Amino acid sequence: MDVDLPRDLDPEVRADLVAREKAYCQGLQKAGTWVHIWRCVGQYANLSVFDVEDNEELHRVLWNLPLFPYMTIDVTPLARHPSDLAADDAGA
Ligand SMILES: O=C(O)C[C@H]1C=CC(=O)O1
């Protein structure tokens, strides 16, 4: 997710958006939906991993991001790799 907030955005609007984004993100982390979030170094961007049932759920999660109107999002579907030790644990 790349974030591009307008430079002339009212500071109060910006602070409110960022606070709502953080609360939304942390709520989904607690629910187990937003599994990882990493800052891309030197960029106002993050790399995130979601655990969702299907594309519709992911779309809903992303669409409802408070910062969604200011984001460019690339989605890469991931599957468990058969050589992953965790896959052995799961008996896969
Ligand atoms: O800071 C960001 O990368 C944008 C956004 C995604 C989650 C969150 O709390 O902020």
Image (cartoon, grey):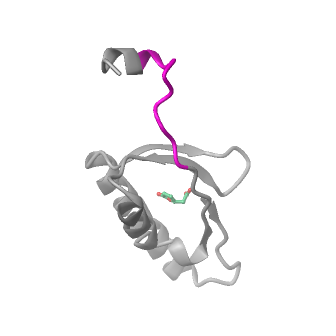
Nearer to me, 14 or 61? 61
Image quarter of residue 75: bottom right
Residue at the (60%, 59%) spot, across then down? 1
Q: Is residue 55 left or right of residue 29?
A: right
Q: Is residue 69 above or below residue 23?
A: below
Q: Position of residue 35 (x, y in %)?
A: 40, 42
Residue at the image point whose x is 35% and y is 22% from the top: 92
Q: Is residue 33 left or right of residue 75?
A: left
Q: Tell me which secondary structure the magenta stretch mostly adopts.
A: loop
**Residue 27 sits above or below residue 3 on the image:** above
Residue range corresponding to the magenta coloring: 77-86
Residue at the outermost right position: 42
Q: Nearer the viewer, residue 61 or 11?
A: 61
Residues 25 and 18: in front is: 25
- Left of 29 or right of it: where is 3? right
Residue 40 at what x, y percent from top left?
Answer: 66, 46
Q: Is residue 36 left or right of residue 91?
A: right
Is residue 80 shown in magenta?
yes
Residue 85 forms part of the magenta stretch: yes
